Image: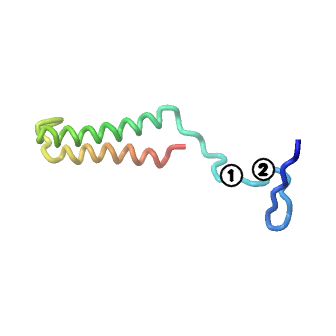
Amino acid sequence: MAESKKRKKNGHEVEDDTDIQNWTDGIPLSPAWWAPTFVALMILGLLWVVVYYISSGTYPVPKLGAWNIAVGLGTMMVGFLMTLRWR
């Protein structure tokens, strides 16, 4: 089988991939529950806002009034911010 060519970096050959450092080394992986949680939060926030609009403010919490939008958007924002820490 033919051997692939060696990589060249600034005129010299790199023997193997261990010479190239990965910036993500040392960063721990996210727990298994992280991704399902942020997806669920974003969907829950979206559903909260949609239910508020469809029900003309009657649901999900009638006493909150227009603050229902803030609750839905806040829930979606927490889910989105969790995506930034996901690995």
Mark 1: amino acid: Asn
User: Residue tagged by mark 1?
Assistant: 22
Q: Residue at x 15, y 47 (%)?
A: 66
Question: How many C-alpha atoms fall within 10 Å of the one at disc 1: few (<14), some, or many (≥20)?
Answer: few
- The local secondary structure at tag 1 comes to loop
* Residue 71 image position (x, y, % from top left): 24, 44
Mark 2: amino acid: Asp
- The image quadrant that residue 28 belongs to is top right
C-alpha distance separating marks 2 and 1: 10 Å
Q: Residue at x 17, y 43 (%)?
A: 53
Q: Nearer the viewer, mark 2 or mark 1?
A: 2
- The image quadrant that residue 78 belongs to is top left
- The local secondary structure at tag 2 comes to helix
Q: Residue at x 12, y 44 (%)?
A: 65
Q: Residue at x 40, y 47 (%)?
A: 80
* Residue 63 image position (x, y, % from top left): 11, 39
* Extreme-front residue of the structure: 1
Residue 6 to residue 42: above or below: below
**Residue 17 tag number:** 2
Q: Is residue 44 left or right of residue 87?
A: left
* Residue 61 image position (x, y, % from top left): 16, 36
Numbered label tally: 2
Q: How is the image coloured?
A: rainbow
Closer to the N terminus: mark 2 or mark 1? 2
Image quadrant where one finds the N terminus: top right
Q: Is residue 22 left or right of residue 64?
A: right
Residue 67 to residue 39: above or below: below
**Residue 71 tag number:** none
Image quadrant where one finds the C terminus: top right
